[in-house]
Amino acid sequence: MTHSGGNNPRGGDKPFLSAEARSAKAEGLSRLSKAARQFQESAIRRTGILGAAIPGLISFAAGYPAPEMFPWDDLQAITSDLLAKHDGNTLQYGATRGYRPLIEHLIAHGLKDRGVTARFEDIVITTGSQQGLDLAGRVLIDPGDAVIVELPTYSGAIAAFHNLQAELVGVPQDAEGIELESLERVLTGLKAKGQRAKFIYVTPNFQNPAGLLMSAPRRRALLDAARRHDLVILEDDPYGSIYFEDTTSVEDTRPIKADDTDGRVVYLGSFSKVLVPGFRVAWMVAPSAIAQKVELAKQAADLCSGVFDQRVVHGTLDRGVVQGIAPTLRAHYQHKRTVMEQALQAKLGDRIKWTTPRGGFFLWIELPPGIDDLALFDRALKEKVSFVIGSAFYVNGAGHEFARLSFSGITPEQIVEGVERLARACMAD
Ligand SMILES: Cc1ncc(COP(=O)(O)O)c(C=O)c1O
């Protein structure tokens, strides 16, 4: 065959491909969209997979709720009552917005009790608040748009916005939450480049991963800054009801959404941490114009969230199960937090630093000087303990001096043993 060459310097009838491009082609990757080629596996999943291969591993990595706290008997009674009725709607496709009695219950109780006023048209039930992050991103982000996140921030949000081709810009936090002077600097810098941020993503209550509780004045100041710069705030609040003894006032965890008088806060809540995550039932409260578009995006994604799941969740609210277990859940996680702190204090107190979390599932530790998160992770796996590396929560390549330890889903005995293993990993050369 005579050759006209393409761009293949060695001749032949095939255009030249680099080794990387050839391997991408061989694996079918060249067919993928530009966005899909950039999809990233979450570091939490990756650490989970690495850990699962090690028998006897104690995982501080997964932020799972405690299965011993699942209300098994109530769930059994509610599900069997639902199924006994043979009502087709219980197992049929449902409305994209969600099961109306569940939404109405949220409006009249769950949201109202937290100070949030919402109408039916402002709410969409989502398949976990992870879907809320994705759907909010879908209706707000164009490829290349800037999205502001905290440093550190929830890695699932990084994945959702990254997959939508956002440019993620980090703003540091201090003890009170996102630093507003830094935020101003970042926004000015973006403006100078002709760019605008679409929204600011924050988790004010017991942040994943840093465990921080944003102060009330900082929440108000952040809302003022968003108003001045005409930005949306995406407020993610899965841990708001899991507060510990020193956070006595509901005011301390009051959502920013509660003070949203001009429709700029999109608020996400979830039943994953306060009931069970397996139902995948969560909710979004948004200005109705945004909620309408989210409904359309959701229709294309999954038509509706699990209809049976939503009815069971509604049953638990109707019978006061969620409300009834809340104090026990708080005491349970507070106890595990204290056990982890005491173990860390005893074994590593002079080598690592942390701030006591006032709620939530996580202890965020600063590693001993000279050890970075990746190196410690390798050593920790050898000792059969895992955690999530701090850098997984940073969008600017930083965070290698931190690690996230979750105390929620394991037993106090495992926490103590896991900390002993972690201490050995920190001491190893
Ligand atoms: C901050 C944050 N947002 C969202 C999610 C997702 O929760 P869901 O189970 O409701 O999808 C999590 C889960 O760990 C989380 O920590």
Image: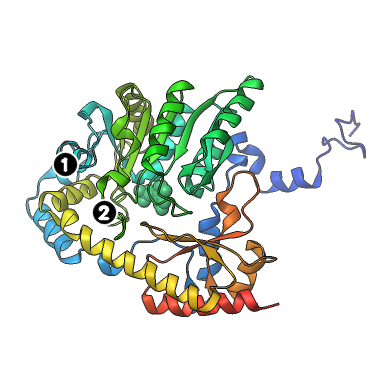
Report helix, strand or loop for mark 2: loop
Q: Residue at x 66, y 78 (%)?
A: 428
| Residue that carries the numbered disc 1 in the rendered image | 109
Amino acid identity at mark 1: His
Check the image and name the residue furthest to the top.
194
Q: Is residue 273 above or below residue 406?
A: above
Q: Is residue 249 above or below residue 166?
A: below
In this view of the protein, which residue sits in the foreground, 420 or 282?
A: 420
Report helix, strand or loop for mark 1: helix
The residue carrying pointer 2 sits among few (fewer than 14), some (14 to 19) or many (20 or more) residues within 10 Å by Cα, namely few
Labelled disc at residue 248: 2
Q: Residue at x 54, y 48 (%)?
A: 152
In this view of the protein, which residue sits in the foreground, 146 or 351?
A: 351
In this view of the protein, which residue sits in the foreground, 336 or 309?
A: 336
Q: Residue at x 15, y 50 (%)?
A: 317
* Residue contact between numbered discs 1 and 2, judged by CB atoms under 8 Å: no
How far apart are labels 1 and 2 at the CA level?
A: 20 Å
State left or right for residue 187 relative to residue 3: left
Amino acid identity at mark 2: Thr
Quarter location, residue 165: top right
Which quadrant holds the C terminus? bottom right
Q: Residue at x 9, y 50 (%)?
A: 86
Residue 96: x percent and y percent? 27, 33
Mark yes or no: residue 73 visible. yes
